[in-house]
Amino acid sequence: MKTTDSNRLLGAATALYGAAVMARPEWLAKPCDLRLEPDGRVPGDTGLLIRAFGARDLVIGLAMVAATGEGTRRLATWCRVAADTSDALIFGTQLDNRQARLKAAGFAASWAALCALSLPSIRS
């Protein structure tokens, strides 16, 4: 595996996750213990915000995959780290359910750390 492959792989996984939660917002709503309709669907306003998160992740992930220069890939990766760090802070302090706060914040912080750890492997 080339040195930038792990970074591109993280970008691809980010993009896939973004597309997945855009298509199925309940995949983010349920672990965060967000309110669902009685039939299990995500309410429209919550779905809108989840899809915005998904679109952000899709775009940043694609940038990590497609970037050709070292500086551009680093910038895309730093955007990923910043987005996940802010997610960890917001979910970790704002979700009503303590277990959901810990789970969502832990996942986001772990993803931020993985992406940050991939930065040294980026080479032109």
Image: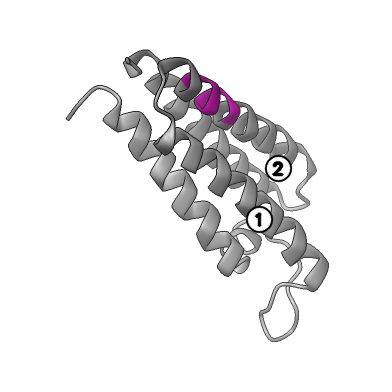
Quarter of the image for residue 121 reads: top left
Residue 86 screen position, x and y as percent:
69, 32
Which kind of residue does numbered mark 1 sit on? Answer: Cys
Q: Which residues are magenta?
A: 74-79
42 sits to left or right of 107: right
Q: Position of residue 24 (x, y in %)?
A: 57, 69
For marks 2 and 1, give the CA distance. Answer: 8 Å
Q: Nearer the viewer, residue 8 or 98?
A: 8
Residue 47 circle label: none
Q: Please tell me which residue is depicted at 34% across the width and 39% down the height of the picture.
A: 9
Q: Residue 45 location, x and y as percent?
A: 82, 66
Tell me which residue sits at (60%, 58%) in the image: 28
Residue carrying label 1: 32
Q: Give the mark nearest the N terminus, 2 or 1.
A: 1
Q: Position of residue 3 (x, y in %)?
A: 25, 22
* Label 2 secondary element: helix
Main secondary structure found in the magenta portion: helix
Establish if 116 lies above or below 37.
above
Furthest residue in direction left, as rendered: 1
Q: Are marks 2 and 1 in contact (CB under 8 Å)?
A: yes
Secondary structure, mark 1, is: loop
Considering every residue shown, the one lying at the far right of the view is: 45
Near-viewer residue (110 or 123): 123
The residue wearing badge 2 is 91
Query: Which quarter of the figure is the C terminus placed in?
Result: top left
Name the amino acid type tagged 2: Phe
Q: Name the residue rendered at 63%, 65% in the picture.
A: 25
Residue visible at 76% across and 37% down in the picture = 93
